[in-house]
Image (spheres, helix red, strand yellow):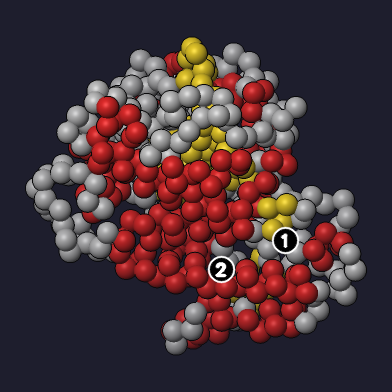
Amino acid sequence: MPRPSWLLDRRAVLRGAGLALALPWLEAMAHAAPAAKPPRRFCAFFFGNGVNLQTRHPGHEDWHWFPHADGPDYTFTKSLEPLAPHRADLTILGGLSHPTSRQLVGHNTVDVWLTGADIRETLTNSASIDQVIARHQGAQTRIPSLVLSSHGGVGTKSRSTTIAFDQQGRAVPAESNPRRVFERLFEPPTDGDLAARRRALTAGRRRVDFLLDDARSLRNSLGRPDQQRLDEFLQSLDEVEGRVARAQDWLGQALPKVDRGAINLDVSPQGPTDYIRTMYDLIALAFETDTTRSAAYQVTAEDGVGVCDRFPTILNFGRRNGHHGLSHDADDTTHGWGRYDRYLAEQFGYFLARLARVREGDGRLLDNTVALYGSGTSTTHNARNYPLVLAGGKTLGLKHGRYIKQRAERPLGDLFLTLLHRFDVPARSFADNAGEFREILAS
């Protein structure tokens, strides 16, 4: 491959009107540092209240979350069908849980999903795996970790609205405002450009426009593949900002008070979709620009907590009000709960497709990212057999294309310790692990 005419540092940024945004991985950066490899990222996505596992009637089996056969020849049920295009990039896991959490009321497991801590007596938590990884490699990025949730804040112990916990076991506040998340991707101005930025924002100029002048100058110095990559990146940035604006409009609306059986027709069903996809886009953008290498997003909370509990009602997935109510009415709303499981899987599939489209080094952004998706209960209050999907991470040595079903309950800490070693974290144990989970490794 011809050497690009201009070599770029990995920390190169586009600048304009007091803003600075890190560039995505370009070939010119690889030539500038031949030994450099694309960074490795970790992200985790949690949804509350478990999944639909009803099989009392023949028609319910198609909406059972877990496949009915394990190994490489499994078949997706309707609940996970949206993930079928990514079959080669993911593994479905069954039979994993945290041993000390198995006797907890299911809703409490949100606090320990990523930590595995024993909170039965004192509610004292420990560090979550995303924060362990962030501490190990966070100094290499401007933002050590990105912590998001659809409700925001920390909530209360045993009903947390964040899934991230620091080294002392303290809840890490989650951000729920897409616009504030978006603005964190830009370095704050440190000089007189602040006034120029304020004037430009007041005039209503879009943030991405501030970067175009520098981008045009840079584009002329790049080879054709990098030019195309830069154009795609700027277009993606523009799309994200547009969705941020739409999601902000929806998020700012006050929630109406309605009866359990009512559906509020004044709230667009597209509201949750735009919002969730915006959050996924923001994480992808943060990874793409190497602004952070660790992200945790609580897509929906437990036990009817927060705005996200109304997502199924807005989307018309059941008669009862909210996600928690839907999960307690499984006999009558199996298809509704299954459809909502499918909906959430579809949004996660959107994120995987987003990462798969981004070329990075000799592979894709998805190959350099480990993504964990799932819940801390199998059904509403059963803190066993967590529904889990592990995706990406090909360059980290992960092997996919299977449904791995444990015949007996196995510590989720086994998986977490194995993942930590993939990120070169020198950990000897994690929570109450009994060993490692080498089944997910290519060799």
Q: Is residue 46 visible?
A: no
Q: Which residue in the structure is indicated by mark 1? A: 25
Q: Is residue 115 above or below residue 247?
A: above
Residue 315 image point, x, y percent: 26, 53
Q: Residues within 10 Å of mark 1 (few under 14, many from 20)?
A: many
Where's residue 387, x and y in %?
Answer: 43, 30
Judge from the rendering whether residue 6 lies leftward or rightward of residue 55; answer left or right: right
Identify the residue shown where x is 75% and y is 78%. Answer: 218
| Count of numbered circles in the view | 2
In the figure, 89 relative to 22: above or below?
Answer: above
Residue 323 seen in the figure: yes
Residue pictured at 39% horizontal, 17% vertical: 102
Residue labelled with disc 2:
236
Marks 2 and 1 sit apart, C-alpha to C-alpha, by 14 Å
| x, y percent for residue 30 | 83, 59
Whichever of callouts 2 and 1 sits on the residue coming sooner in the sequence is 1
Image quadrant in which the C terminus is located: top right
Percent coordinates x, y for residue 183 in the rendering: 50, 66
Residue drawn 23% across the image and 54% down it: 314
Would you say the residues marked 2 and 1 are in contact, meaning their CB atoms lie under 8 Å apart? Answer: no
The N terminus lies in quadrant? bottom right
- Please tell me whether mark 2 sits on a helix, a strand or a loop: helix
